[in-house]
Image: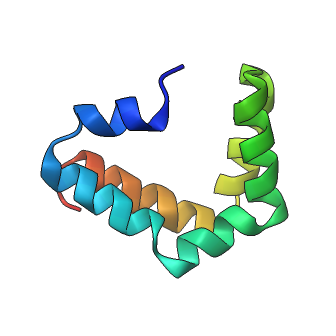
């Protein structure tokens, strides 16, 4: 799995800036600090694809998680 610096280096400057801005958004940070965000981080560190999928589904089942997914999708389509 690529590390964050490697992934960011491959993004255009505009998308990199938008992603870093999104990551510093207080609402996004709160989402990552909650139990579902912590579970997602643990699953990502473990490298267990099934655990990661399950944790992501749990996060995306929340209103906040869906809003984040929409923002990321817009970023991926050049709208963010």
Which residue is at 29% across, 56% downward? 74
Query: What is the quadrant of residue 33 in the picture?
Result: bottom right
- Residue 50, quarter of the rendered image: top right
Residue 32 visible to the viewer: yes
Q: State which quarter of the image contains the N terminus.
A: top right
Identify the image quadrant of the C terminus: bottom left
Front-most of residues 41 and 53:
41
Residue 27 relative to residue 6: left or right = right
Give how far across and how far down residue 53 sits, in percent: 70, 32
What residue appears at the point 84 percent right and 61 percent down from the top-left corner?
35
- Looking at the rendering, which quadrant does residue 29 occupy? bottom right
Question: Looking at the picture, does residue 15 appear above or below residue 28?
Answer: above
User: In this rendering, does residue 62 appear at all?
Assistant: no
In the picture as drawn, the residue positioned furthest to the bottom comes out as 26
Nearest the eye: 9 or 48: 9
Residue farthest toward the front in the current orientation of the protein? 5
Give the image location of residue 48, x and y in percent.
Answer: 77, 21
Q: Residue 5 location, x and y as percent?
A: 40, 37
**Numbered marks: total:** 0
Left/right placement of residue 49 relative to residue 51 reads left
Q: How is the image coloured?
A: rainbow
Give the residue displayed 46% in from the left and 75% down from the top: 25
Asked whether, in this view, residue 23 is left or right of residue 35, the answer is left
Residue positioned 72% across, 22% down in the render = 47
């Amino acid at each position: 799995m690529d590390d964050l610096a490697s992934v960011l280096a491959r993004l255009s400057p505009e998308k990199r800036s938008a992603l870093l801005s999104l990551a510093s958004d207080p609402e996004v940070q709160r989402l990552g600090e909650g139990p579902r965000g912590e579970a997602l981080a643990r699953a990502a560190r473990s490298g267990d694809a099934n655990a990661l999928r399950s944790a992501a589904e749990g996060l995306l089942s929340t209103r906040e998680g869906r809003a984040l997914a929409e923002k990321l999708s817009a970023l991926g389509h050049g709208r963010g």
